[in-house]
Amino acid sequence: MKSIFEKIISREIEADIVYEDGLTIAFKDINPVAPKHFLVIPKKKIKNIQVVTSNDMHLFTHIFSVIQKLSVQEQMVEEGYRVVTNIGEYGGQTVEHLHFHIIGGRPLRWPPG
Ligand code: AMP
């Protein structure tokens, strides 16, 4: 069965897309936890970072370059921002498609809940 994020990639459901290229797509989180909250995901179906293999390393390099570009595009660099990826139940992962939260626009507390 397709996950929500696969349906966003295939345009079966709408999202507020802020960046896209051949390998990745980035869009606004539907339930933002801060004034700026984006999700960067690979188009390739990968559950989470736990199952990433050495064959996917090029994709990881690419995702981090997309995060850099997006943070510049969305004017988050000067104030700073946080990158989060959740894994499994205790990690708080609710969508089983690898995604990186890019969160900013306000000071963020640490540690998280
Ligand atoms: P996680 O809990 O780390 O798996 O994060 C999943 C994120 O996806 C949550 O922050 C949700 O708010 C977000 N989300 C779920 N459905 C959508 C959607 N249709 N469009 C944008 N973001 C979504």
Image (cartoon, helix red, strand yellow):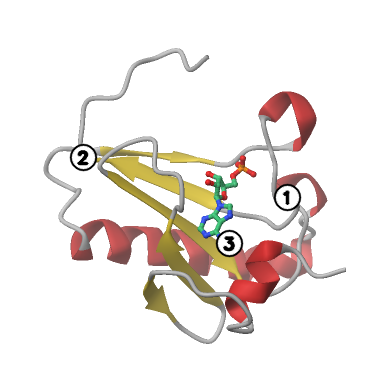
Residue 43 appears in the rendering: no
Q: Nearer the viewer, mark 1 or mark 3?
A: 1
Query: SS of the residue at dot 2?
Result: loop
- Residue 69 at x, y = what percent? 29, 66
State the residue position of label 2: 105
At a point 39% along the width and 69% down the height, the residue shown is 16
Three-letter amino acid code of the residue under disc 1 = Asn
Is residue 52 at least partly visible in the picture?
Answer: yes
Compare residues 16 and 88 and report the one nearer the observer.
16
Q: Amino acid at mark 2?
A: Gly
- Residue pushed farthest left? 78
Q: Are marks 1 and 2 in contact (CB under 8 Å)?
A: no
Give the residue at x 21% y 59%: 74
Of the residues shown, which amino acid type is indicated by label 3?
Answer: Phe
Q: Is residue 5 left or right of residue 45?
A: left
Q: Nearer the viewer, residue 89 or 77?
A: 89
Q: Looking at the image, do the residues carrying marks 1 and 3 touch, with CB atoms under 8 Å apart?
A: no
| Residue tagged 1 | 48
Work out which quarter of the rendered image holds the N terminus and state it. bottom right
Circle 3 residue: 60
Q: Position of residue 57 (x, y in %)?
A: 66, 64
Which class describes the residues within 10 Å of circle 2: few (<14), some (14-19), or many (20+)? Answer: some
Q: Which residue is depicted at the point 22% across and 38% down?
A: 80
Q: Is residue 22 left or right of residue 90?
A: left
Q: Quadrant of residue 106?
A: top left
Q: Is the CB of the residue bearing disc 3 within 8 angstroms of ligand 1?
A: no
At which x and y percent is residue 47?
78, 55
Ligand 1 lies under 8 Å from the Cβ of mark 2: no
74, above or below 87, in the image: below
Distance from label 3 to label 2 (Cα)? 25 Å
Between disc 1 and disc 2, the foreground one is 2
Rounded to the nearest whole Å, what is the CA distance between mark 1 and mark 2? Answer: 26 Å
